[in-house]
């Protein structure tokens, strides 16, 4: 393989730039040309791409977002869109494509390869950590650290006023961010989509804390919880438990930005290297991840969302520590 391209697709995540940098520099080191495609599959359809050299990826390893920009392309879901995308790649002599994104982006890559023979490799880039085939996705570690930093600050003010805070974190289908950050901030409860939330049990728990003279309580709510977001759950609790003054904070997109953690920089660098080497050796239609700290490949057909793969021992630990 003489020429490859790289794009970022779907929700951006910290560590994508570290990964782009790695793809570019490893490809050059392997004697290949490497093209950057702007705005994900949208840019691919529009032919918005340019050849990158080593200096194009200087000074980006520490930056959040993605220098290649991202998009969620509706046009790429159509046969015509994919045909245009493939034609643009072929015109430039590009034979392989590295797609940094989530499971939807990998499904697109799989179809592109099936229909047009472009060899594709996926790299898991999402803060949600909800993909089968990798212990960690790019951006998850940074997002958890961002939540912890923010909630520590909320705890200070919650404590000063004896308040009950509901803090909503991202994770529309998965509670990984909520669970990890919840343990790290000593949350009194963690509500996630993978488990049923019982408002009465939550109130019982808050009552126990109140009886023990707790000066503040923090409930971490994953946005996809079955009882609703933080505002809805706060309303339901307020109706039956009024000892504390109740406040809600939705952390939102600040969880997606910021300088990537050391772990995410390392992960992006390792996955970029593995992806390029895989393409070079003829591997394709696979996502490259890391399992037990080793590089692992999973076919696109299996690299789905792992909605129910929550770590039960962590949940149990959270439960005990918050008593
Ligand atoms: O990246 C995944 C995610 O963070 C979800 O947890 C969240 O619901 C979603 O992105 C929001 O993304 P956007 O603002 O791009 O629609």
Image (cartoon, rainbow, N blue to C red):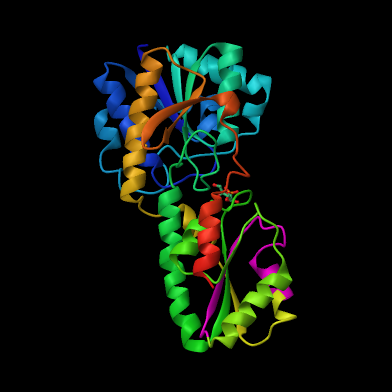
Would you place residue 51 above or below residue 116 in this image?
below
Q: Is residue 312 left or right of residue 227?
A: left
Residue at position x 63%, y 44% from top? 308
Would you place residue 161 above or below residue 280 in this image?
below
Would you place residue 242 above or below residue 109 in this image?
below
Whole-percent x and y of residue 61? 30, 43
Residue at position x 46%, y 46% from top? 13
Q: Does 176 appear in magenta?
A: no
Residue at position x 64%, y 67% from top? 230
Q: Evaluate whether residue 178 shows in this view.
A: no
Whole-percent x and y of residue 104? 60, 34
The quadrant in which residue 35 appears is: top left
Q: Is residue 236 left or right of residue 31?
A: right
Q: Evaluate whether residue 248 shows in this view.
A: yes
Would you place residue 317 above or below residue 73 in this image?
below
Whole-percent x and y of residue 111? 61, 20
Q: Is residue 125 left or right of residue 222?
A: left
Quadrant that contains the C terminus: bottom right
Whole-percent x and y of residue 71? 55, 39
Residue range in magenta is 214-236
Quadrant that contains the N terminus: top left
Q: Name the one closer to the observer, 132 or 320.
A: 320
């Amino acid at each position: 393989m003489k020429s490859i391209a790289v794009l970022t697709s779907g929700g951006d995540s910290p560590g994508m730039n570290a990964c782009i940098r790695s793809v570019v520099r490893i490809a050059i080191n392997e004697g290949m040309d490497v093209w950057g495609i702007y705005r994900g599959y949208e840019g691919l359809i529009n032919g918005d791409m340019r050849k990158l050299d080593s200096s194009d990826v200087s000074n980006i390893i520490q930056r959040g977002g993605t220098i290649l920009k991202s998009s969620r392309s509706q046009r790429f879901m159509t046969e015509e869109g994919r045909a245009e995308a493939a034609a643009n790649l072929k015109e430039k002599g590009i034979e392989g494509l590295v797609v940094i994104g989530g499971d939807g982006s990998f499904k697109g890559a799989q179809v592109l390869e099936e229909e047009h023979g472009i060899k594709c490799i996926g790299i898991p880039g999402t803060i949600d950590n909800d993909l089968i085939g990798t212990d960690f996705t790019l951006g998850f570690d940074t997002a958890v650290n961002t939540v912890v930093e923010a909630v520590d600050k909320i705890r200070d003010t919650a404590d000063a006023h004896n308040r009950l805070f509901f803090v909503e974190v991202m994770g529309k289908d998965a509670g990984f961010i909520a669970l990890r950050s919840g343990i790290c901030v000593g949350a009194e409860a963690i509500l996630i989509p993978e488990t049923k939330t019982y408002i009465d049990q939550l109130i019982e728990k808050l009552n126990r804390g109140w009886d023990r003279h707790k000066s503040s309580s923090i409930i971490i709510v994953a946005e996809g919880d079955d009882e609703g977001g933080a505002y809805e759950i706060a309303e339901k609790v307020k109706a039956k438990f009024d000892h504390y003054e109740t406040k809600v904070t939705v952390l939102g997109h600040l969880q997606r930005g910021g300088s990537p953690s050391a772990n995410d920089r390392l992960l992006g660098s390792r996955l970029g290297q593995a992806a390029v080497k895989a393409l070079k050796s003829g591997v394709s239609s696979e996502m490259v991840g890391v399992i037990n700290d080793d590089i692992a490949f999973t076919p696109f057909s299996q690299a789905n969302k792992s909605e129910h793969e929550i770590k039960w021992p962590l949940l149990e630990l959270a439960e005990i520590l918050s008593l």
